[in-house]
Image (tube, rainbow, N blue to C red):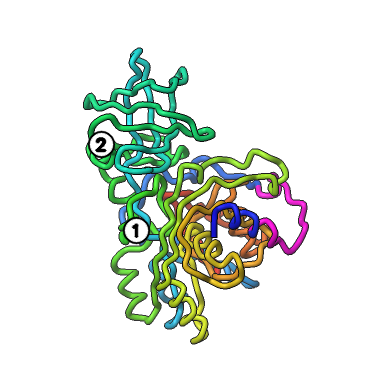
Amino acid sequence: MGEANVDILCRSSRLLDLDLKRSDFHFDLPQELIAQQPLAQRSDSRLLHMPIQSGELSDRRFRDLPGLLRGGDLLVFNNTRVIPARLFGRKQTGGRVEVMLERLLNEHECIAQLRVSKPLREGGRIQLEDGSELELTGREGSFFRLASRGRGLSELLESLGHMPLPPYIEREDDAQDRERYQTVYARNPGAVAAPTAGLHFDVGVLGELERQGVERAEVTLHVGAGTFQPVRCDDIEEHRMHAEYLEVPEAVCEAVERTRSRGGRVIAVGTTAVRSLETAAADGDLKPFAGDSRIFIYPGYRFRAIDGLITNFHLPESTLLMLVSALAGRERILDAYRHAVEKRYRFFSYGDAMLIL
């Protein structure tokens, strides 16, 4: 299945014409609740449990998660690994350039965003801190195609790259971000943003889940910088998602089928795991998938692959907030977010978590 087919199927699967506007997903968030640093221990984060159909909210800690699941449930993780995707250099004229990789095409070519005072022309070069050079070879929409004229990009990123912290974290990256802006199970390099729901899991929580008989499966979705792009159109149906590469292996499909057959629940760890599974189930049945997806999930969407979700708290008016609203209802989600603000939960990437189940 190709990228275009996924996009069409998602748009044709709306059950209701809800005429939703971007402003319908607004909530007031005090600036001081945006987490700027990770907690000392991953599983010390708070966990807001919201029953998916009805019931009261419950304030807990993330380490309580095993007690909220049961043997035979399946957790689906995104095993992508964040690459140190920010590079700094200068144009041939001396002007400063910030390079934010979006996707590695091969060892010497990439797609990237550029932050620069005056645009580079095709053929223009960026000199990095060690003297290595990147050449601008073309455009792809709002992105630039760059080629390394020397060292391979993986080597350049490892030696010169900075962790690509989100724009709402208002500080420079530091040494701890190399570990903490990464899940403990990350293994497939390619993301330029972390699948943040997974940041709360540590070895202790994973071990307790295993002892309890909760199974796990792994998909891969390389999160792109476009995940932070705002919805600019008032009518949300006019919004077009950025493309992201994902893989759902046969083993995941088999694990989901086994879980269903024994009466267990399929719980996605993060919105990226949701979008991976729902892309692979776009024609009604979950099948192996490898390729780009632009799936956009908002209220009215009928979920095919998941029963629950572990997720962080998301930005107002964002596509991620629209996704969780599709799962549990917009008004219920906004009520839960107002509760989280009142109780001083920490928001966004290094913030607290929510279990919708």
| 267 lies above or below 155 | below
What's the residue at 25%, 27% (across, down)? 132
**Residue type of the residue flagged with mark 2:** Leu
Is residue 218 or residue 21 the one in the foreground? 218
User: Tag on residue 128?
Assistant: none
Give the image location of residue 243, x and y in percent. Answer: 52, 48
Q: Quadrant of residue 220?
A: bottom left
Residue 320 in the figure: left or right of residue 92: right
- Judged from the image, the secondary structure of the residue bearing numbered disc 2 is helix
Mark 1 residue element? helix
Q: Is residue 338 visible?
A: no
What's the amino acid at mark 1?
A: Arg
Whichever of labels 1 and 2 marks the residue nearer the N terminus, that label is 1
Q: Is residue 120 visible?
A: yes
Q: Where residue 268 appears, x then y in whole percent?
A: 48, 66
At 40% across and 45% down in the image, what residue appears?
192
Residue carrying label 2: 156
Region of the chain picked out in magenta, as a range: 10-25
At 52% across and 81% down in the image, what residue appears? 260
Q: Which residue is mark 1?
A: 42
Of residue 229 and residue 343, the one placed in the foreground of this image is 229
- Left or right: 170, with 29 as reference point: left
- Local crowd size for mark 2, using a 10 Å CA cut-off: few (<14), some (14–19), many (≥20): some
Left or right of 142 in this view: 249: left
Residue at the image position 30 percent from the left and 73 percent from the top: 207
Q: Is residue 23 magenta?
A: yes
